[in-house]
Amino acid sequence: MPVIEITSWTPSEAYLADASVLKSTLDFLKGVEGCKEIYSGLAENTPQKKVFLVVGKNNLINARVAMQSLILPVWESYEHHKALIDNPPPPETVTLGPAIQGNFSMYHINFTKDVSVALSATYTEVLSTTLREGKTQEDFDKAARAISEQIDLANPEHAPVTWGQSVEDERKFYFLVGWDNLQKVEEVMTSAALAPSRAELRDTVAFDFDVVQLAKHA
């Protein structure tokens, strides 16, 4: 599966006033070898908003700040991203600086299933999880399968739920889920049917989530 790059930061006032401050970055990424798709969007579910950018084909970084921006690039492979890092463009060609207030972070995720259904939905849930002390990847896989099966049953239009492990931190995993609207997210995620699998996941990982309306740029 292609790799998804999830980059996040607290957005600047300049970005919040005019998201086109990212245009030079988006235009540059469109021409980079291995960059298969690009999405970006502002989280909708909490006052602690984030902007997401997704690059690749196949985003949640959590920060308790007033607002946060997130970028999710989808790459054909991690090696394509590394080639860009090893041979960066001139600073004047592409810069995120004007869009960033602070709290910049980046993760590369190897998802287990195709993410196109989640990324192309009206809303995309990005769930960031970290294994609790004493828990293993096997514990996570069991909990992830259980809750994903329940969500897929309740939300078949956007099945399957997909998840993946971070390249940078083997204890960190991400889920992507597509939704039609915020009401459906609330209805399914707080339902009695999900209570057992939700409790199992909560016992296995610490997690935070955002729900984003993503726009496709390439």
Image (cartoon, rainbow, N blue to C red):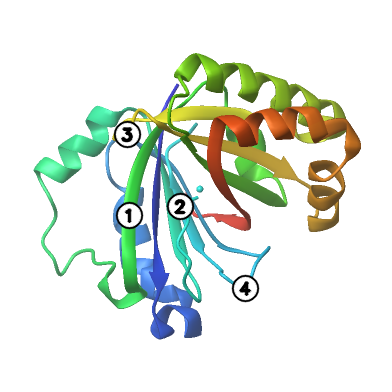
Q: Amino acid at mark 3?
A: Asp
| Dot 1 and dot 2 residues touching (CB under 8 Å) | yes
Tell me if mark 1 has few (under 14), some (14-19) or many (20+) residues whose alpha carbon lies within 10 angstroms of its own: some
| Dot 4 and dot 3 residues touching (CB under 8 Å) | no
Which label belongs to residue 105?
1
Label 1 vs label 3: CA separation?
Answer: 12 Å
Label 4 vs label 3: CA separation?
Answer: 28 Å
Tell me if mark 2 has few (under 14), some (14-19) or many (20+) residues whose alpha carbon lies within 10 angstroms of its own: many
Q: Which circle's residue, 4 or 2, is located before the other in the chain?
A: 4
Q: Which circle's residue, 1 or 3, is located before the other in the chain?
A: 1
Q: Amino acid at mark 1?
A: Ser
User: For residue 82, which quarter of the picture?
Assistant: top left
Q: Amino acid at mark 2?
A: Ile
Q: Which residue is mark 4?
A: 47
Question: How far from the left and from the top, in percent, is residue 25?
Answer: 32, 62
Label 2 vs label 3: CA separation?
Answer: 13 Å
Between disc 1 and disc 3, the foreground one is: 3
Q: Is residue 196 above or below residue 108?
A: above
Q: Which residue is mark 3?
A: 169
Residue 159 appears in the rendering: no
Label 4 vs label 2: CA separation?
Answer: 15 Å
The quarter of the picture where the N terminus appears is: top left
Residue in view at x 55 percent, y 61 percent: 41
Question: How far from the left and from the top, in percent, is residue 83?
Answer: 16, 36
Question: How far from the left and from the top, in percent, is residue 93?
Answer: 19, 64
Specify whether 127 is left or right of 189: left
Q: Which residue is mark 2?
A: 61
| Dot 1 and dot 4 residues touching (CB under 8 Å) | no
Q: Secondary structure at mark 4?
A: loop
Q: Is residue 52 above or below residue 200?
A: below
Q: Which residue is more in the foreground, 112 or 174? A: 174
